Amino acid sequence: MCTMIAHQVKLKGRGKSGPEWFEVREANVSYDHPYDLPLEHALNIDFVNEALGPGARVAVELSVEAARQLVKTIEAVLAQADQRGVLEDISVTAQPAARS
Amino acid sequence: MYQTDQYEGMIAETVSMRGHKGDMINAYVARPLGAGPFPGMVVIHHAPGWDEWYRECTRRFAHHGYAAISPNLYFRDGHGTPEDVGAKVRAAGGAPDERVLGDLDGANAWLRSLPYVGRKVGIFGTCSGGRQAFLAGCRLKGLDAVVDCWGGRVVQSKEELTPAQPVAPIDYTKDLSAPILGLFGNEDKSPTPEQVNQHESELKKHGKPYEFHRYDGAGHGFFYYDRPAYRQEQAVDGWKKVFAFLERTLR
């Protein structure tokens, strides 16, 4: 892509692409050309499992404003859950690998 | 311009070809029917992938009388929809320059092996393909014309260099061995007008034959009719400039 600003984080989760769920092992976060959002550049998140091939992908393309709102919202939800003592903080790895 | 009473035919298909290090990769080829000789064109797909727009672009060159080949530069990254494969390469920071150059050299050799291809072969690319077209014009032998459409990151800061793209293409300008046509939008962020100025200065400095056209009211990717970046007037003029340049340099 033209900016080549991309980071990958290793994680554990599940994603749904079509009718089936699959194991998510990586999230690729980039600020580069989106495929469908009508902007030149966007904040793109691909939840993938590289071992399963390129088709194992749940894609989201966001404007900068939407991406910032999402980050704040995730933090707010986690803080609220923590405050209520319901966070289950187990077995999640996060190893940022900058590739920009 | 073709006439309404003239014969016209074309064949277009996917083929296999040898790319970097002799690897077999696939490519999309379109050529006019007939014995030729037709000038050759290597058509470099953009960063989003080896997609439908590039199939059409390859056929467009054939429609204008060129034998055109568009190698799948993401062949080694797996198969699936062009978007899924392109997203994988996007996450990896793009395809490695050396591998791309090997594939483009292979595409040129493939064209030159054909009895209906003439003595001259040009290269065309948009977006990352524009950058790679310029890089190929500097690093490869046997290219007779280069078309760089809004190639971003020809000018790169040290911080932007990666193991896959370790040298800024502008640093190879002295080695450019073919005339270059550049088309750019003045509202583009990659390359910015300032970066296009730098590129032009470097071409001047080394006495390279070049022709740059910069369009007001256009940004990045103004040929892409399926994206909001499309600019009808600028795109029509840009395509005219492309074919006028190729007629001059390849025929």
Image: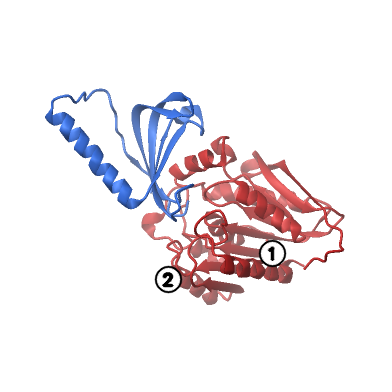
Chain colours: A blue, B red
Question: Are discs 1 and 2 less than 8 Å apart at CB?
Answer: no
Secondary structure category for the residue under label 2 = helix
Secondary structure category for the residue under label 1 = loop
Q: Position of residue A76 (x, y in %)?
A: 19, 38
Disc 1 versus disc 2: distance between alpha carbons?
Answer: 27 Å
| Above-or-below relation of B199 to A51 | below
| Residue named by callout 2 | B194
Labels 1 and 2: the sequence-earlier one: 1
Q: Position of residue A22 (x, y in %)?
A: 43, 24
Residue in front for this viewpoint, B192 or B100: B192
Q: What residue do we see at 48% from left, 60% from top?
A: B152
Q: Nearer the viewer, mark 1 or mark 2?
A: 2
Quarter occupied by the C terminus of chain B: bottom right
Q: What residue do we see at 58% from left, 63% from top?
A: B148
| Residue named by callout 1 | B144
Q: Position of residue B207 (x, y in %)?
A: 58, 76
| Chain for disc number 1 | B
Residue B179 visible in the picture? no
Image position of A12 (left or right of B97): left
| Marks 1 & 2 on one chain | yes
Q: What residue do we see at 56% from left, 59% from top?
A: B130
Instruction: Say which amino acid is labelled 1.
Output: Asp
